[in-house]
């Protein structure tokens, strides 16, 4: 279903008419010895970003108040100053030498070949949990060029008949995580790798992961743009800063070389400006060699065509044809596209220009309340700022998250991963040590929350979180009971961003034994430990009886409700039933007692 172009997406920037020298006419003559710089450029108005992008500047996905960041060098900094901008300079990360494996590059980052092998190995090692899917071909493969690739995803779930089918009419909610649509954003694929391993290695051990894989499908695309990533890898310890795919059919542009000019003038299409929904508006360029080139037409690129087809095959169409149509609150599915670098959780609309700080109600998505709530819930874990792109970054059209929400109604997000300059990992291409040391610890729980919310994101995200679930007796018998405690908290919204939702008082909590609420389980009410539900954070408790349960592990499903009437996501905990008369305080390593 196609929609007419939104009026905000076609507003012409007055600053386009300013005498900003197009960069694509100035690519030649740079010294190979020049080191790229990240330039902090203060904006006069939101329209500056569109003007700079249209003029060929390499606008990065980061913002600091009224400043944006551009990849350039000293000559570009001088050019910006000449056009009236205030510019400060930061160096990019120096070369990082690989030590982990001969296939790795830039200090340890995995290559496309390694990501492909990883998915195949996971599927082979876990045939009951994982299935690899070939969903299309890259531009190079379709054009019989060297280094062409299949486009690959992996589906992770406790596989049953009909699971992982390319059909939106499934009984299991789906969560899709994708990475590296922009080839040079190295951190993103590393996060996808760790997410895959967390899921397959945690099944049967971690109660939340076990619950998720029993009842949901987790889809992952570690490298959306493999042709482009191979170009990046060719730089080795000094990766080429290639953003786009490898399509060379739109004009003559520089080929990969150490010359700095290649970073600003490169062949290919920016796949995250090529989506078919509201294509061709803000923060795009019509010049084929510019970093933000939108392509010759909407979804012109095979990578984007295949991705849109896959998204349509995974998620039901829950939204009408009008731009103002709201997806129902029962809509299932969550989609996250990983980018770098900044500390942001972004959500639709990205295609509208809202001013410097916030969007008016008519510029917000019809499902803004649910989208914003889930963004702030995720930012509770990673500490990022949440908002529409215009509120915390800048407007951009033809993006994949706008497509997934705009066409189908899927709750769709972009994570911009990476801290500000001056911090230890504050580089556009950060040291590999930042992956496990900083980025993964922050985003692990945010992704788990998103996966839980995929059952009904517009409703679940507006309810309270359940955490710190504990049993006072790790092994019970059919004739004994254990006390389950948990914390139900509606204040778990991140602090940064625009229009943080207001916490509500907790009004109820409940637990289900062995059978979750969506499968017809029986609710056992939990009581407030202080005797009354009256605040946004409540400790709750209840006695759990094991009568009638077979020996072994069973899942408990805990959730809470707030004064607005919304139930939050379920948090799982193990209940282990054994033999004996009294509460057993000894348990074995293969029956872990895991709390959240």
Image: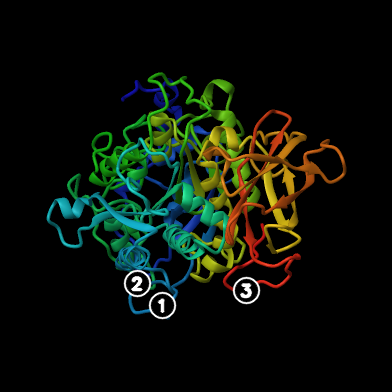
Which numbered disc, 2 or 1, marks the residue closer to the eye? 1
Most extreme residue toward the right is 530
Q: Which residue is mark 3?
A: 588
Where residue 98 is drawn, which disc sits there? 1
Task: From the top left corner, tell me how far across and down residue 579 is, in percent.
Answer: 65, 66
Crowding near pointer 1: few (<14 within 10 Å), some, many (20+)? some
Residue occupying the point 60% across, 31% down: 358
Label 2 element class: loop
How many angstroms separate mark 2 from mark 3 (CA)? 47 Å
Image quadrant containing the C terminus = bottom right
Q: Earlier in the sequence, mark 3 or mark 1?
A: 1
Q: Quadrant of residue 464?
A: top right
Going by the image, does 540 lie left or right of 217? right
Which numbered disc, 3 or 1, marks the residue closer to the eye? 3
Q: Earlier in the sequence, mark 2 or mark 1?
A: 1
Q: Nearer the viewer, residue 542 or 413?
A: 542
Residue occupying the point 37% across, 60% down: 128
Task: From the top left corner, tell me how far across and down residue 124 is, in percent.
Answer: 32, 66
Q: Quadrant of residue 197?
A: bottom left
Which numbered disc, 2 or 3, marks the residue closer to the eye? 3
Q: Nearer the viewer, residue 416 or 552?
A: 552
Q: Is residue 250 above or below residue 564?
A: below
How many angstroms separate mark 2 from mark 1 (CA)? 9 Å
> Tags 2 and 1 in contact by the CB under 8 Å rule?
yes
Going by the image, does 151 lie left or right of 498? left
Task: From the top left corner, tell me how far across and down residue 577 is, in percent.
Answer: 63, 61
Where residue 369 is drawn, which disc sits there? none
């Amino acid at each position: 279903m196609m929609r007419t172009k939104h009026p905000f997406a076609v507003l012409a920037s007055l600053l386009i008419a300013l005498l900003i020298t197009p960069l694509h006419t100035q690519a030649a003559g740079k010294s190979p010895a020049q080191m790229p710089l990240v330039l902090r450029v203060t904006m006069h108005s939101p329209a500056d970003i569109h003007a700079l992008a249209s003029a060929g500047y390499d606008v990065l996905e980061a913002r600091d108040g009224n400043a944006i960041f551009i990849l350039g060098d000293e000559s570009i900094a001088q050019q910006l100053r000449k056009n009236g901008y205030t510019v400060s300079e930061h160096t990019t990360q120096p070369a990082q030498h690989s030590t982990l494996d001969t296939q790795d590059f830039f200090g340890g980052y995995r290559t496309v070949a390694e990501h492909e092998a990883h998915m195949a190995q996971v599927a082979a090692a876990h045939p009951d949990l994982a299935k690899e899917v070939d969903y299309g071909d890259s531009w190079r493969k379709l054009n019989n060029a060297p280094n062409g690739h299949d486009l690959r995803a992996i589906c992770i779930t406790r596989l049953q008949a009909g699971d992982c089918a390319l059909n939106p009419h499934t009984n299991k909610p789906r969560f899709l995580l994708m990475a590296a649509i922009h080839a040079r954003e190295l951190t993103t694929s590393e996060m996808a790798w760790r997410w895959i391993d967390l899921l397959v290695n945690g099944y049967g051990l971690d109660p939340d992961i076990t619950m998720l894989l029993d009842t949901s499908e987790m889809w992952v695309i570690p490298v959306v743009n493999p042709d482009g990533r191979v170009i990046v890898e060719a730089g080795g310890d000094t990766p080429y800063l290639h953003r786009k795919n490898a399509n060379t059919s739109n004009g003559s542009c520089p080929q990969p070389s150490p010359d700095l000019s290649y970073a600003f003038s490169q062949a290919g299409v920016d796949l995250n400006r090529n989506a078919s929904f509201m294509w061709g508006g803000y923060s795009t360029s019509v010049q084929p060699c510019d970093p933000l080139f939108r392509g010759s037409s909407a979804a012109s690129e095979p990578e984007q065509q295949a991705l849109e087809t896959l998204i349509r095959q995974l998620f039901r169409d829950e939204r009408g044809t009008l731009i103002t149509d709201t997806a129902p609150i029962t809509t299932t599915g969550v989609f996250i596209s990983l980018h770098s670098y900044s500390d942001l959780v972004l959500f639709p609309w990205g295609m509208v220009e809202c001013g410097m700080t916030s969007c008016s109600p008519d510029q917000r998505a019809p499902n803004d309340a649910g989208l914003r709530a889930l963004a702030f819930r995720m930012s509770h874990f990673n500490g990022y700022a949440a908002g529409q792109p215009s509120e915390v970054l800048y407007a951009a059209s033809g993006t994949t998250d706008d497509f997934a929400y705009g066409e189908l109604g899927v709750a769709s997000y972009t994570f911009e991963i990476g801290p500000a300059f001056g911090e230890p990992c504050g580089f556009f291409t950060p040291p590999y040590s930042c992956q496990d040391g900083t980025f993964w610890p922050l985003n692990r729980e945010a992704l788990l929350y998103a996966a839980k919310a995929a059952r009904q994101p517009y409703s679940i995200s507006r309810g309270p979180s359940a955490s710190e679930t504990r049993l006072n007796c790790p092994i019970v018998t059919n004739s004994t009971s254990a006390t389950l405690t948990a914390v139900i908290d509606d204040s778990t919204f991140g602090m940064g961003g625009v229009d943080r939702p207001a916490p509500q008082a907790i009004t109820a909590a409940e637990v289900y034994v062995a059978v979750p609420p969506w499968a017809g389980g029986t609710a056992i009410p939990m009581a407030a430990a202080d005797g009354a539900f009256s605040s946004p954070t409540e400790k709750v408790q209840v006695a759990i009886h094991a009568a009638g349960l077979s020996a072994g592990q069973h899942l408990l499903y805990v959730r809470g409700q707030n004064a607005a009437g919304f139930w939050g996501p379920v948090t799982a905990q193990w209940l282990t039933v054994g033999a004996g008369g009294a509460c057993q305080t000894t348990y074995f390593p293969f029956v872990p007692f895991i709390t959240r």
